[in-house]
Amino acid sequence: MAAKKSTEPGTESAASLHLPVLLEEILDLLQVVPDEDYIDGTVGLGGHAEAILQRSSPEGRLIGIDRDRDTLKLAEDRLKDFGNRFIAQHGSYDQTPALLQARGWKQVQGMILDLGVSSYQLTHPERGFSFLKDSALDMRMDLEEEVTARELLNDLPETKLATIFWEYGEERFSRRIARAIEHSRQQAPIRTTGELCQIVSRAVPFSYKKGRIHPATRVFQALRIAVNRELDILQAFLKQSPDFIKVGGVLAVISFHSLEDRIVKNAFRSWKQHFQILTKKPLVASDAEVERNPRSRSAKLRAIRRLA
Ligand code: SAH
């Protein structure tokens, strides 16, 4: 009899839960050096980290940071054969300088960020990221944070919600949807992803519902970005030039949203004196990759190398 497929963290194989995006491209840019140290600021299920650790053998170490403890456990399990060359670190990547200092690390040869959510998070309904299954409106990557999607949805002023849907979701019916939410929450608080889906579906024109993506896709993305303060964190990280990267070392960032990509592009430009831009235009996934892994559809990869 086939074993029952469990969804408990630690009992699934990380490799099957999430395919790393733009893997070849990122390895090409990083040019991993044996025995050197690296940071993966969004280690997720450890796909990119595994490839880096393989190439930095026999002694190179990698700190893998993630805000999500469940995810971090899966990454640890996947990378256990690397022993103490892999170091799992709970936290947010904008804390990288402090996290390095706390461990007595001075500089690393490279760092990567692969922003956004993992397929693991999206497919675990209890996390509330997905509109495909009805569950509590949570969407926190770090369950130790306080504010959930439910709170934002029920507490923010209608105009603020509309701005979030417009800016973070590029949702053209942002105002209508925010109005419908306002109506609904006046009757009773909105509690589940299913309720939110229904409200969005009723608020948008019929033709929109027949589009390529589910009509609630953009609203869910926008709420997730707001709940997790994703753009603020990216900005905070990029506010300081990454002095913890060695001369010759590389920082590579994969983003999934035009606002993120713009933040990365501008930061990289502002560092031109000390860093060489390795990607004049951001690299995007090949058709074959998009076919294999739909998450790569909107991925954009930019990288820089430290000159001095
Ligand atoms: N590259 C990974 C997948 C990363 S998915 C792999 O190959 O498996 C993105 C991950 O980033 C998620 O696990 C999410 O929890 C994490 N994340 C998002 N924002 C973060 C932040 N500010 N700090 C640390 N991790 C973050």
Image: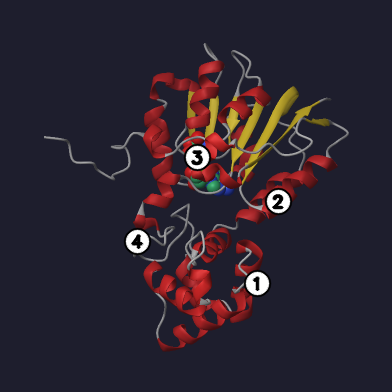
Q: Which residue is mark 1?
A: 163
Which badge, 4 or 3, is on the more N-terminal residue?
4
Tell me if 4 is positioned left or right of 125 in this view. Answer: left
Residue 99, by quadrant, is top right
Amino acid identity at mark 1: Thr
Amino acid identity at mark 2: Gln
**Circle 3 SS class:** helix
Residue 222, by quadrant, is bottom right
Amino acid identity at mark 4: Lys
Say which of 24 and 108 sits in front.
24
Is ligand 1 within 8 Å of the beta carbon of the residue shown at mark 4? Answer: no
Which badge, 4 or 2, is on the more N-terminal residue?
4
Observer-side mark, 1 or 2, equals 1
Which badge, 1 or 3, is on the more N-terminal residue?
1
Q: Which residue is mark 3?
A: 291
| Residue sticking out furthest to the left | 1
| Residue sticking out furthest to the right | 273
Determine whether 56 is above or below 47 in the image.
above
